[in-house]
Image (cartoon, rainbow, N blue to C red):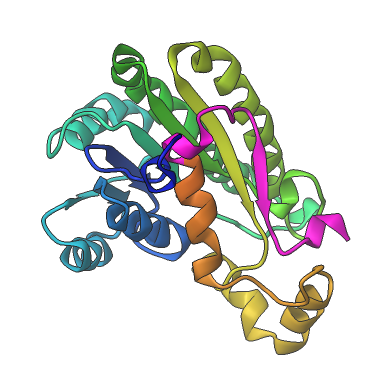
Amino acid sequence: MTDPAALFDLSGRVACVTGASSGLGRRAAVVLAEAGAKVVGVARRAEALDALRDEIGADAAAIAADVADRDRLPALAERIAAPFGAPDILVHAAGINTRQTADAVTPEGWDTTIALNLGAPFFLSQALVPAMRARGWGRIVTFASLQTTRAFPGGLAYGASKGGIGQLTRAMAEAWSPHGITANAIGPGFFPTELTQAVFEDEARAARNAAQTCLGRNGRMEDIDGPILFLCSEASAYVTGQILMVDGGFTAK
């Protein structure tokens, strides 16, 4: 009989979390560290990363970098592996939402959104997969969205990138799962993060979003803990190519 606690124990694992300076990425980094993993946080804001490292302690490292800069990805992969070894777990939480309407989408806004939200998760995974393949074990978790399957006003570029995450997740699973590497995505509903600050500042809008869920409320940061730990641990060994919606039933209603 399998020990239930062992299924979620990440002792001896190394996790890399992008977008770890704030929001759901920061939460993921803390949760994985609490489960026993050594965590490398990657984001552009060095000061916020330093605060995360101080909170976690000796089992955390911080790397200030732009994961969308493809020219520097080989060097970034080496920097990620330097503190604790090449990661077993890779969580892609870095993202941007330019919130441009269809008529106002600019080439610059489109390119920035696609590069960070869709390009970076693939190319950084591609750079770090060889070490996972050599060990025969790996976990890749991307962040999808309500807009992976639904259209929201002002979300054309963002929605396109998150729709792409759905297919990217399936394609990475097809390519790498035969080597023991699972690839899954979490689709969060409305959580209080920097990306959704405008939503939560509008109390009426936040209330409408809550009313559209089956649970009748918006997400709390602790709601992401179980799903992220599940997808990053041995508990999800037979789960790959899937999008787990953590949205209180928003997409079910």
Q: Quadrant of the C terminus?
A: bottom right
When asked about the image quadrant of residue 244, the answer is: top right
Q: In this rendering, does residue 68 appear at all?
A: no
- Please give left or right for residue 72 compared with residue 163 in the image: left
Please, which residue is most extreme toward the right here? 253
Could you tell me how many numbered marks the image carries?
A: 0
Q: Position of residue 54 (x, y in %)?
A: 16, 66
Q: Is 156 placed above or below 136 here? A: below
Where does residue 146 sit, x and y in percent of width and height?
72, 53
The answer to whether 163 appears left or right of 42 in the picture is: right
Q: Is residue 190 above or below residue 87?
A: below
Residue 232 in sight here: yes
The residue at the point 72 percent across, 44 percent down is 148
Q: Residue at x 34, y 22 (%)?
A: 127
Q: Which residues are magenta?
A: 232-253
Q: Which residue is more in the foreground, 246 or 71?
A: 246
Find out whether residue 252 is within the magenta segment.
yes
Q: For residue 56: magenta?
A: no
Image check: 213 left or right of 13? right
Q: Give the percent coordinates (x, y) of residue 84.
A: 14, 37
Residue in the image at 62% along x and 70% along y: 219
Looking at the image, which is closer to me, 37 or 209? 37
> Can you name the residue that lies furthest to the bottom here?
203
Say which quarter of the image contains residue 58. Answer: bottom left
Q: What is the quadrant of the N terminus in the image?
A: top left
Q: Is residue 146 above or below residue 202?
A: above
User: Residue 81's x, y, as percent?
Assistant: 19, 32
Residue appearing at x 36%, y 42% in the figure: 6
